[in-house]
Image (tube, rainbow, N blue to C red):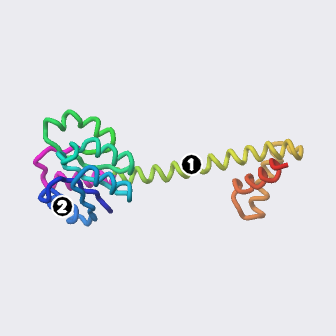
Amino acid sequence: MDALIVASTPNRQHALTDVLHHVKINCVVCSTAAEARRASLCRPFDLFVIYSGLSDEHGNELAMAIADGNDCGGVFIDDYMRTEQIESELNDCGIITLTRPVTKSALLEAVKLISVSNARVRALKAKNDELTAKLEDMKYISRAKIVLMRSLGYSEEQAHKYIEKKSMEMRVSRGKVAMDILKTYEAI
């Protein structure tokens, strides 16, 4: 698991990396928002921890940008007064807000929650990709049936059986057979 740590002072950076190394998380450390943005563009991170009050910005906009760009959750550490103002906005992006001073146990608990939610999001994305691929195949199959019905005078049931039979004979998916049919008959 990889984490992006963004804190302006070496003491804060060291404190955060020590906690995350303790739970075997690899850390990339940045001291400015600009540096963190470049790092998040170069590689994906599983989570991030931003200690507010960076030299080039407060850090809440950086947190939202990283969460959006990497599809990951993070922790934003801020003063109590500012945290209440931006907490709901950050929570909507999957970012847990903690107020200073942060205890080791609070940070570890937040990281655990983010890890669990990230795993759930990855599983949902995989399922979504699978369903999207099936839907795409169904579109091709439907179009191929229509082409067979128009070109060869098949009924819908005959067209369906033809695609099924070709799929079994060729040992490929029905979607692949449908694409081949479309290439053959729509090119004419």
- Mark 2–mark 1 distance (CA, rounded to whole Å): 39 Å
Q: Quick check: 56 left or right of 137?
A: left
User: Nearer the observer, disc 2 or disc 1?
Assistant: 2
Asked whether 104 falls inside the magenta stretch, the response is yes
Determine whether 1 is above or below 86 in the image.
below
Residue at the limit of the structure toward the right, as seen here: 153
| Residue range highlighted in magenta | 97-116
Asked whether 76 falls inside the magenta stretch, the response is no
Query: Disc number at residue 167?
Result: none
Residue at the limit of the structure toward the top, as seen here: 85
Q: Secondary structure at mark 2?
A: helix
Q: Quick check: 65 left or right of 99?
A: right
Discs 2, 1 touching: Cβ within 8 Å:
no
Quarter of the figure that contains the N terminus:
bottom left
| Residue pointed to by mark 1 | 131
Amino acid beneath label 1: Leu
| Viewer-proximal residue among 173 and 157 | 173
- How crowded pointer 1 is (Cα within 10 Å; few <14, some 14-19, many 20+) is rated as few
**Image coords of residue 157 (percent x, y):** 81, 45
Amino acid beneath label 2: Val
**Image coords of residue 138 (percent x, y):** 67, 46
Residue occupying image coordinates x 37% and y 45%: 68
Give whichever of discs 2 and 1 has the lower sequence position.
2
Q: Main secondary structure of the magenta part?
A: helix
Residue occupying image coordinates x 72% and y 64%: 171
**Image coords of residue 159 (percent x, y):** 81, 48
Determine whether 164 is above or below 79 in the image.
below
| Residue pointed to by mark 2 | 19
Residue occupying image coordinates x 60% and y 51%: 133
Tell me how many marks there are: 2
